[in-house]
Amino acid sequence: MKDTRKPYIAGNWKMNLDRSRGLDLIKTIKGRLGDGSDREVAVFVPACYLADVSAVAQGSPLGVGAQNLWYEKEGAFTGELSAAMLREVGADRVIVGHSERRHVFGEKDEWMSRKLRAALDSHLMPILCVGETLEERKGNRTDRVLKRQLETAFLDVKPEEIRRLTVAYEPVWAIGTGEVATPEQAAEAHRFIRRWITGRLGAEAGLAVRILYGGSVNPGNVRNLLAVEDIDGVLVGGASLRPDTFIPIIEFGL
Ligand code: 13P
């Protein structure tokens, strides 16, 4: 079943890299990508670099995405960017509900379904992030948290849209900490997410949806993670910032 889902390797730069180092990294990645037929690779860059990065990526299968969006079309939303604005500067995808947005900037569960709707309506492919904190895991509340995050985000998603939507399981305790979920812990959470989506949108959607793992992914652990049946790719933070760590992740299994 897993072989019907193309592996998806995504780098999330967060608020890192300056313009020149970022563009150098894109040139290196571009030079190492094949034709994109056996894996999908994308970078999620600071919005101020989207136009330059997408210009350099042009002509290659490298996807270029934003790290956030606001769901309204326009209006008095100081500091925010709409889906159409992101499209206009070259983004073809966007991250929705990253845990740093939820926990550092107070983004609410209720916003996520509208953000997904805005992205899908504007032909931006969203990656919806879900994941529990350490306290929630210790309190055996992981499934309950994932269910709540999925239920609030999937209010308005149609089964036929699932091929354009990706879910990323990012346990908050594994992000930027060097502590990676074991393949067993990740497998359990991914299985839960796929079952939930199957229950909500049907068997076909459950089989088709790609679920990425994120949290301290590096060249040393990527292979074991990607060997897990329900892990269809990775969302990489720190290790996506340098060619010597991101290229081996992109080239896993080659
Ligand atoms: P790290 O790979 O730095 O742990 O970050 C993971 C992440 O948050 C990707 O979105």
Image (cartoon, rainbow, N blue to C red):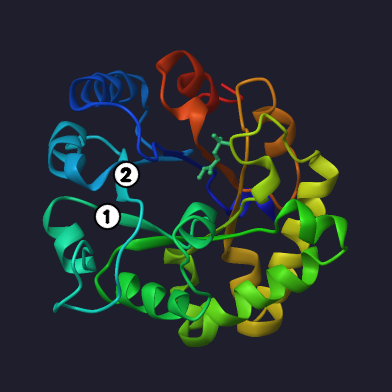
Residue placed most toward the observer, 180 or 122: 180
Q: Are marks 1 and 2 in contact (CB under 8 Å)?
A: yes
Residue shown at the point (76%, 58%) measured from the top left? 189
Residue shown at the point (20%, 73%) measured from the top left? 77
Residue shown at the point (62%, 81%) measured from the top left? 151
Residue shown at the point (70%, 66%) measured from the top left? 193
Name the quarter showing ligand 1: top right
Q: Residue furthest top?
A: 244
On the rendered image, what quadrant is the N terminus found in? Answer: bottom right
Which structural element holds mark 2? Answer: strand
Say what amino acid the circle numbered 1 marks: Asp
The image quadrant of residue 73 is: bottom left
Residue 66 picture location, percent across and down: 30, 51
Which residue position is annotated with label 1?
92
Say what amino acid the circle numbered 2 marks: Gly
Mark 1 or 2, nearer chain start: 2
